[in-house]
Image: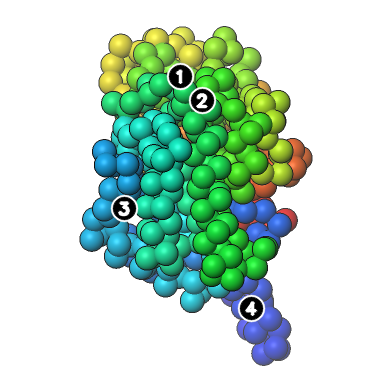
Amino acid sequence: MKRFQFLPTFAVFTLCLFAFGVVVGQKAPSKYVLIGYVGSGRWTKEDIEANKLTHINYAFAVPAANGELAPLRPKDEANLAALHSLKAANKDLKILISIGGWGGCKYFSDVALTDASRKKFAASTLALLKKHRLDGIDIDWEYPDQIGDNNIFRPVDKQNFTLLLKELREQLDAQGKQDRLPASGHYLLTAATGGDTAFVNHTELRNAQKYLDYVNIMTYDLYHGNDKKTGHHSSLYQSALSDRSRNSSDDAVDGHIKAGVPASKIVLGLPFYGRGWTDVNPTNNGLFQPSAGKHMSPNFHDLVDNYINKNGFTRYWDEQAKSPYLWNPQSRTFISYADEESLRYKIDYVKSKGLAGAMFWEYTLDKDKRLLNTLVKGLAK
């Protein structure tokens, strides 16, 4: 402290401004998008640092059996109003409603089935957008022509996914003209897409992407709660120990590009949570080993408080995969997750591949903003 006692007042003031700008006043990157999913859990608008994000996707609205969007709960309506108020802090912030999500996709196949059903659903979606003064729609259909969580699925979903996006795009553009939006500020249409090869095979991404502003690849849950074998749930590259039965983030991005999605539309998805397994075979500190136990999914601040190099857990780094993991030999528990180091590699990847930016699930899982600040700082460089 003594070194600063004799600095001129202007110098002290300049140092304070510098600290404020770097730490407190970080702003969302201007060149890249940074999309944060915000769920309906416990948060207030004071918890959301709007100036660090370019887009917020509120999760979730869901299709209903009648072919329209199910009515939002009063809590969701209040949350959307709170998010809209954040534009006072960041006038360029875009607020979208995300439709679907795991557990919310039962009727997507039905609403996409015919021209009439697509028009009906799109009109319902536009009504919600107008009512809550939203900037766009995010479609999270899990998954076209694939089983998800008690969802209806059909082979024609492959084509109907594209046709549903086309109908939404046309109605959004018509509404934008009616509202006299500038061409550079039209209503947005984005989609969350699967990080596995199956999603690419069950959709027509080359055609579907034409109607989308961004394609947000969920490059996480590549190993998940239904697996009886551990693995990196969001590695950047393949591990030297991997049997390559699952994609890495790089595999997912390259698969989308080969399927016809321009790199400039791709947004790399990142997890603010981990995937864990108990009763794991101890070989290789539990990595890529069978598990006979239970699954767990701790959020990042829980990992920091209770797991990372704590309570018998040791952090390891997979250099080839660019991914951390935890191993507890006493409880034989393995946890895959993302941290600041792994995110820095992914930020470099976004830039080197010419991607649009990054998105993450979910805002409240990073209580101390360690991951969020890493993304903001890295993308702004």
Q: Which of these two is toward me, 43 or 194?
A: 194
What's the CA distance linking mark 3 and mark 4?
A: 35 Å
The coloring applied to the image is: rainbow
Residue type at tag 2? Lys
| First-in-chain label (2 vs 3) | 3
Q: Which mark is residue 158?
A: 2
Front residue of 245/297: it is 245
Q: Pinpoint residue 302: horizontal percent, then vertical percent.
A: 35, 43
Of 182 and 327, nearer the camera is 182
Which one is earlier in the sequence, the residue at label 3 or at label 4? 4
Q: What's the distance in space between the residues labelled 2 and 3, CA to CA?
A: 30 Å
Q: Examine the image and state in which quarter residue 343 appears.
A: top right
Q: Is residue 56 visible?
A: no
Q: Where does the image place residue 380, in percent across and percent down from the top left?
A: 68, 57
Mark 3 neighbour class, 10 Å CA radius: few under 14, some 14 to 19, many 20 or more: some
Circle 2 Cα neighbour tier, 10 Å, few/some/many (<14 / 14–19 / ≥20): many
Above or below, 20 relative to 209: below
Residue 155: mark in rendering: 1
The quarter of the picture where residue 221 lies is top left
The disc labelled 1 sits on which kind of residue? Pro
Q: Can you tell which quarter of the image residue 174 is in?
A: bottom right
As helix, strand or loop, the secondary structure at mark 4 comes to: helix
Mark carried by residue 40: 3
The disc placed on residue 17 is 4
Q: Residue at x 65, y 68 (%)?
A: 182
Q: Amino acid at mark 3?
A: Ser
Residue 150 seen: yes
- Closer mark to the observer between disc 2 and disc 4: 2
Q: Disc 1 or disc 3, which is closer to the eye?
A: 1
Label 2 element class: helix
